Image (cartoon, rainbow, N blue to C red):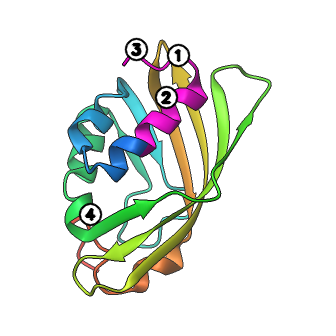
Amino acid sequence: MSAPTSPADLYRHSLRLLLDKNIADWVGLWDEDGIMEFPFAPPGWPERLEGKETIAAYMRHYPDHIDLHDFPDLRIHQTTDPGTIVVEMRGVGRLVETDAPFDMTYIAVVTVQHGRIASYRDYWNPLAVLEPGTDFTGSSR
């Protein structure tokens, strides 16, 4: 497969990697100095992750806690900046610890530079992490 060229193609590829639970390759899509932000992060959860290694550490155990099955309702909006997209989607699956359904709505603002994710602002619902089995960050809530 050739490397994704547009930010939308790169993002779609990143979702396939998450569904395949291939976190190492997902992290490989990031710029070394990439920044991941969570503007609605609840207390005890990170608000900003700086650098590829920090993002890798944050995501390392994600599949052990959330088993993603699909990203329905995916809508990718182009912006006036050709490197930036706005994404609307749902992530559905199950919580591994409790086997409860997982259904999260996301809006993300993603900027790609030189074929890598440089910035990812994830506007997810912080109320969802009140459910048992969702804490994959190692925080001490």
Secondary structure at badge 2 equals helix
Task: Tell me which numbered mark, 2 or 1, is placed earlier along the sequence.
Answer: 1
Dots 3, 1 in contact, CB < 8 A: yes
Quarter of the view holding residue 13: top left
Residue position for label 3? 2
Residue 31 is left or right of residue 112, and the answer is left
Height in image: 67 above or below 100? above
Find disc 1 in the rendering and name its residue: 5
**Quick one: 127 or 92, which is closer to the camera?**
92
- Taking depth in this image into account, of 1 and 33 the one nearest to the observer is 1
- Mark 4 or 3, which is nearer the eye? 3
Q: Is mark 3 on a helix, strand or loop?
A: loop
Magenta includes 38?
Answer: no
Q: Where is residue 26 in the image (x, y as percent from the top left)?
A: 32, 37
Mark 4: which amino acid? Thr
Q: Give yes or no for contact between labels 2 and 1 (Cβ–Cβ under 8 Å).
A: yes
Residue annotated with mark 2:
10
Question: Which stretch is magenta?
Answer: 1-15
Query: What amino acid type should be assigned to the residue bearing mark 2?
Result: Leu
Q: Which of marks 4 and 2 is in front?
A: 2
Answer above or below: position of 60 versus 140.
above
Q: Quadrant of the N terminus?
A: top left
Asked if 112 appears above or below 110 in the picture, the reply is above
State the mark number for residue 137.
4
Work out how far the residue at label 3 is from the one at label 1, CA to CA, in angstroms. Answer: 9 Å
Q: Which label is found at residue 26?
A: none
Left or right: residue 81 versus residue 64 is right
Type of amino acid at the residue the image marks with label 1: Thr
Q: Nearer the viewer, mark 3 or mark 2?
A: 3
**What distance separates the C-alpha of mark 4 from that of mark 2?**
25 Å
Q: Quadrant of residue 116?
A: top left
